[in-house]
Image (spheres, rainbow, N blue to C red):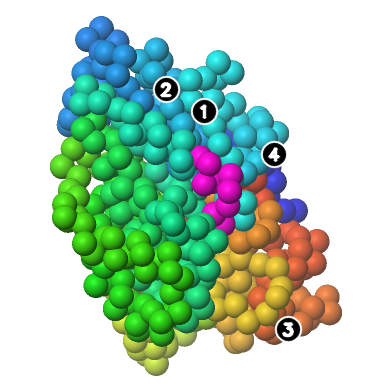
Amino acid sequence: MAVTLQVLHRLARAPLRPLLREGPGARLASGMALAEHAQKLFEITIGAVLPGPMMHRALSLDPGSGQLKVRDRSFQLRQNLYLVGFGKAVLGMAAAAEELLGEHLVQGVISVPKGIRAAMEYTGKQDMLLKSHSRVQVFEGAEDNLPDRDALRAALAIRQLAEGLTADDLLLVLISGGGSALLPAPIPPVTLEEKQTLTKLLAARGATIQELNTIRKALSQLKGGGLAQAAYPAQVVSLILSDVVGDPVDVIASGPTVASAHNVQDCLHILNRYGLRAALPRSVKTVLAQADSDPHGPHTCGHVLNVIIGSNALALAEAQRQAETLGYRAVVLTAAMQGDVKSVAKFYELLARVAGAHLTPSSAGTPVEEGEQLHKLAAELQLPDLHLKEALEVVARAGGPICLLAGGEPTVQLQGSGKGGRNQELALRVGVELGQRPLGSVDVLFLSGGTDGKDGPTEAAGAWIMPELANQATAEGLDVATFLAHNDSHTFFHRFQGGAHLLYTGLTGTNVMDVHFLFLRPR
């Protein structure tokens, strides 16, 4: 059956039953299938990066002295602590901060996704909710992760709080993935609609996320260090839950507490590159001209402490530990998996074949051609810190079940109007690739899931597959190629085996991109 929140809770309470090793191979412990291991590991991985534990690791308060310690820095609290936040995980982060800081917290404003409080209440996640008498005001907006009027009202309330602070105050800023859409504050006279139209045009013409962020920052009151500038001269401590490959603080939520390294000329260069400079609204031209003639020049953020408190790498480290507990030799490949989903799917198919041959060398020789293809594709994907050689060396020595772990955020080129998400599409494409020819005497399972619990505009977090998927789908009358051509992976998995391969967690209250698990077990 599909993985529901209730199933995850049951799995979390159940004792971990490891694989039993028998000589060079292994067999599953009674009552625990390979798929159950994968699903349980996904739930544990999410649990490692929930807001509460991460906030408690990052912050500590001495009640006697009123000293707040953030990593190796200390701040004196005396009714001078304020809080703002924006992002998918910020409700839980704010709840943890409220619990930690108590009466020291004077006032707060947060911007969170529409419906998240109701979702947390419905699933019984009380630790993700603020107290009934909270001093933190909550705005919900950015439905479907798109800036809207509700998010704009939240952003203006956040700016108003920041601008009222003094040199004696401390502003705690909570940031997570989705924060950019939840903090829209265009510089007048640019309207929200004009800014959205421009960024959509740039995206449609192939602008990179870095180029989009450069334009967003130039037209925003709060992004690109604008929030930090609004809070000056107050001290600012920014606690960041990263949803971006490599954890660059200037990119996460468009860097509201990090001074922008770009200027107007950079913006004009981007607009020229995509043929949009001549078509700019008058308001955008006005704002860019004002920035170009600003006598103060770009501001700095010397009064800010930016701290990454959670990331995909942290989630994968916990997954590795727990996979080892379950009896697998576990290796983290990379926390920076990116690239087109078709290429990433091919990478995992080749990895499964090459690793499978290393794991069961007696059944077939190591496929030299596939090994070369794997390394060539890895180079083309330009994956930073990819530990491919080390992983294959571990597999060759393992003699038993293996779990290869990765994380990141592949991209999907939309061609159809179907319903899906990058995790479900990746899983489906890996399933097709693995089903093209036999893998030898090794069982393989691949799982892809979003740590926020919502894969695209669906209720699923992702999906898992085994190599038999294509044949089983055909037997059910499902044409996988047609579903992929329409980017309709969710509809496929919903129909396939009654939805048994979908991952359902509900909104998790966190967000550190996606995780990918590749399990291999000798028969």
Residue at numbered disc 3: 482
Residue 455 counted in the magenta span: no
**Farthest bottom residue in view:** 369
Q: Is residue 262 left or right of residue 354?
A: left
Label disc, if present, on residue 107 of the rendered structure:
2
- Inspect this view and state whether residue 319 appears: no
In the depicted view, which residue is nearer to us: 311 or 70? 70
User: Which disc, if any, is residue 6?
Assistant: 4
Disc 1 element: strand
- On the image, the x and y values in percent for residue 219 come to 38, 59
Q: Which residues are magenta?
A: 146-154
Residue beneath the point at 47% across and 51% down: 184
Q: Main secondary structure of the magenta part?
A: helix
Q: Please tell me how many numbered marks the rendered image carries.
A: 4
Dot 2 or dot 3, earlier in sequence = 2
The quarter of the picture where residue 455 lies is bottom right
**In this rendering, position of residue 349 left or right of residue 365:** right
Q: Earlier in the sequence, mark 2 or mark 4?
A: 4
Image point (76%, 63%), residue name: 494
Mark whose residue sits in front, 2 or 3 = 2
x and y percentages locating residue 178 in the rendered image = 48, 52
Q: Which residue is mark 1?
A: 137
Name the amino acid, label 1: Gln
Q: CA distance from mark 4 to mark 1?
A: 31 Å
Identify the amino acid type marked 2: Gln
